[in-house]
Amino acid sequence: MNWYLDAWKNYVTFTGRSRRKAYWTFVLFNFLAIILVNVVDNVLGLAGQDGYGPLTAIYGLAVFLPGLALAIRRLHDTGRSGWWMLISFLPLIGVIVLIVFFVTDSQPGSNPYGPNPKDTLAA
C-alpha cells in the first residue's frame, strides 16, 4: 500500500527513478479501484451505454497525472527517457515495448536520472 501512496505523494514529479515494485503496485491498485468505481457507477445507475459513468471518468482523470509521472520515473529507472511514452501511440507494438521496459530491472548504480532507488533503500 505504501508504494501506491508514494505515487500519489509524487503526484507530478517527473524527475528521478521508481522501482518496478512501485510501478506495478500502483497499476494493480488502480485496476482494482477502476473495477470498484465502475461497479458503484453501475449500481447507482450512472453508467451510460458503454458501461462507464461519471465516477469512473473522474477517477480516471484524477489518476492520469500520477500514473504518467510514475511511468516516466520507471522508464528513467531503466535508463530511458520519458519520451519513450510516446511509443504507446503505435498500436499494439508500442504497448508491448512499454510493458517490456516496465518489467526490465533497474539500471545498476546511478544514471543521468538519479541514484538507483534500490541502493537508496539499502543505505
Image (tube, rainbow, N blue to C red):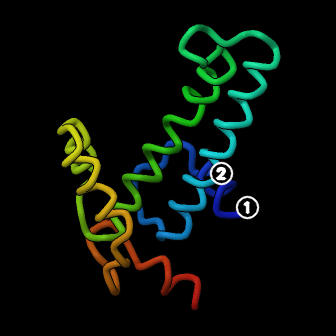
Q: CA distance from mark 1 to mark 2?
A: 8 Å
Is residue 21 positioned above or below 23 on the image?
Answer: below
| Residue behind mark 1 | 1
**Quarter of the figure with residue 17:** bottom left
| Residue behind mark 2 | 29
Going from the N terminus, do you reach mark 1 or mark 2 first?
1
Label 2 near label 1: C-beta < 8 Å? Answer: yes
Residue 44 percent coordinates (x, y): 82, 14
Q: Nearer the viewer, mark 1 or mark 2?
A: 2
Q: Residues within 10 Å of mark 1 (few under 14, many from 20)?
A: few
Q: In what quadrant of the picture does the N terminus appear? A: bottom right
Q: Amino acid at mark 1?
A: Met
Query: Is label 2 in a helix, a strand or a loop?
Result: helix
Q: Nearer the viewer, residue 78 or 94?
A: 94
Query: Is label 1 in a helix, a strand or a loop?
Result: loop
Query: Who's the residue at 40% across and 58% down the image?
Result: 73
Q: In what quadrant of the picture does the C terminus appear? A: bottom right
